[in-house]
Every structure is written in C-alpha cells, then in structure tokens.
Amino acid sequence: MNSSQCFNKMNETYTDILISSEPILYRYMKLCLFAILEVPSVLISIYILYITFSYRKFRSRLRNHSIIGLILLSLIETTTELPIALQYLHLGYVKPNNSSFCLFWIWYNFSLQTTNLSLMTWTSIERHIFIFHSKWFQTSYGKWIYHYIPLIISTIYIPIFYFICVILYQCDNNFDYSLFLCGSICYNNVTWLSSFDWMTNMLIPSLLIPIINISLLVRVTVQIKKVKRILKWRTARKMTIQSLIISTLYLLFWTPLALVSLIRIYFIPTFIDDITFYYLNYTPYLVQLLMPFVCIICLTEVWPKKNRINVM
C-alpha cells in the first residue's frame, strides 16, 4: 500500500467515525427550519419577558408564573442548546468530539427539554386548582404549598435527576460522534433506570398534558352551563383556552416520541428506526421554538393596547 492509498484509507476511517450517515438533505431541512424559527422565537420571548419585568401587575398574577417559566426555558434552550444541535446538523458530527462535551450536551439537552415537559404538566394541573379551588391561594401558606413549591420542584428535579444519571452514574459510555447527542448514554443500558426515566419523565407527562387540559375544558364547559354566569367564568374560560392551545404543542411534538420510545424499549427495538432518528428525536425542539408564538397569541395582556381584542 503506497502513501496515497494509506492516506485515503485513513480519511475513509475518519469520515466513517465522524460524519453522520443521515442524508445531508434531511439534516439541512431541519437546519433551515430551526434556523428560520429561531430568530423570531427569541425576539418574541424577549418581548414577553420585557413586558413581564416592566409591568408588576402582569408578573404578580400567580397564573402567569408558569407561563413565564415556559417562555424563559424556551429562550434559554433556543439561545444556548439549540445552536449546538444546529452545528451538528450543519457539520454532520459532534464538535468538539470528546466525551466531556457529550456528557454536558446530553445532560443539558435532557434537562431543558424534560423540565419544560415537567413544568407544563404542573401548569395543566394548576389550572384546575386556579379555577375550581382558588381559595387555596388566599393565604401565604396556600400560595407556597400549591404554587411556589410545586413550581420549584418542577424546575429543579429534572436537572438534578439527569446530573445523577448522566454525570455521576459510573458506567462505560461508547459515544458515536456521528450521531445526534453522541448516540446513547450508558445509563440507558440499565433497564430499571431507563424505564423509570422514560415512564416518569417523558411518557406519563406527555400523556397527562392533553388529558388534563381536555378534562379542564369539559369541567369548565359544564360549570358554565350549570351556573349560567358568563362574566364570572370569563377568566376561567381564558385560562382554559390558553392551557389547551399550549398543550397542543406537546400533543403534536412530544406524545408521538414518547409512544414510539415505549414501543422501542419494551416491544420492537428497531421500530421505525429512521423516522425516530431523523425526525422524532428533534420534535421537542419545535415545542421550544413555537412556544413564544403560541404564548403571545394567548397572553392578550402583552399585546399593545391599541391592538388588544377580547378574543378570550
């Protein structure tokens, strides 16, 4: 073998290790879609947060806190974690390609996206409390027990859980830098732990969100017909529609991934491999990217006064 052949062989090996096998067209389609949505998503998030911190009345309403949290998570992900994914989609490999970066990226991605899912689950539950048990929030004790503490738990539990599983858990990782998120993390090889993770942190929340919000719509509709006091239930109707619209994002972009993952874990490991790797693994990004668009439609309080209409 001459030097030219040796160099070509080394180059082929290097390419096999680093470059994604995904068709470049698929990668660039996702890259363009995310890049197009990213800028307006960030700008809308900044605008909503500006209104939040500028107007005390808006930020002091308990019912707005979880929505503000969702917007903040969206902004953090689209400005810090999404660029890593965009770089991967552009290059076709993870850069820098070392295990420390892979561990950080996996922890950061899992933490942000699953915290968003956890927070939305609590937001959906809390809407029931706001509408049907509003007296629980009339005391400081009630506010802490039924509002602040659940919000805090929803936002810190997930990062801590994944820090333990991804960073602290001792196992051998075989990262593939040509794959999204470096392939797989080794704790997924521990059946009980990976099952607990998927069931508790992804499957159950992604199924609960639409169920809870549909049940809220039914309860409010029945109550309005029973009481026949539209003015009294205007705020309840508004909160219900807000929550229902936002939950649609999770139904569209989280639930399919959760159900397919369930099938792959327990029944058919190779079930729709290409669709999972090329599309479903990326759909949670659409929740974060579209969240500001949906929220600015629902939160009429942040509209300029001259453009406000009583849509809800």
Image (cartoon, helix red, strand yellow):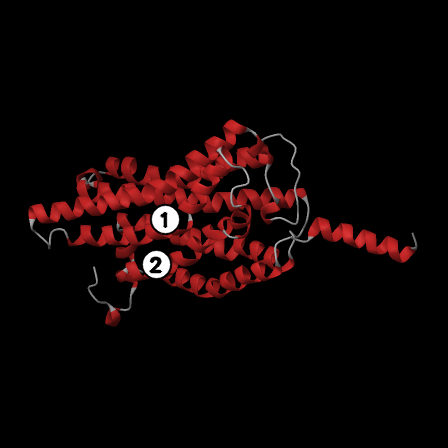
Frontmost residue, 258 versus 269: 269
Question: In the current view of this chain or complex, which residue is farthest to the bottom?
Answer: 306
Label 2: state its secondary structure.
helix
Which residue was labeled with disc 2?
294
Residue drawn at (55%, 45%), measured in percent from left and top? Answer: 273
In the displayed structure, 105 sits above or below 37; it is above
What residue is drawn where x is 48% and y is 62%?
38
Q: Residue at x 19, y 52 (%)?
A: 237
Residue 141 is situated, as x and y percent measured from the top left of the image, at 25, 35
Q: Nearer the viewer, residue 33 or 107?
A: 33
Query: Residue lying farthest right?
Result: 2
Which residue lies under the disc numbered 1?
Answer: 251
Q: CA distance from mark 2 to mark 1?
A: 14 Å
**Helix or strand or loop: what does disc 1 sit on?**
helix
Image position, residue 55 (x, y; %): 30, 59
Residue at the spot x=26%, y=71% of the render? 307
User: Where is residue 206 shown, x and y percent of the image?
Assistant: 38, 42
The one of 289 and 29 positioned closer to us in this rendering: 29
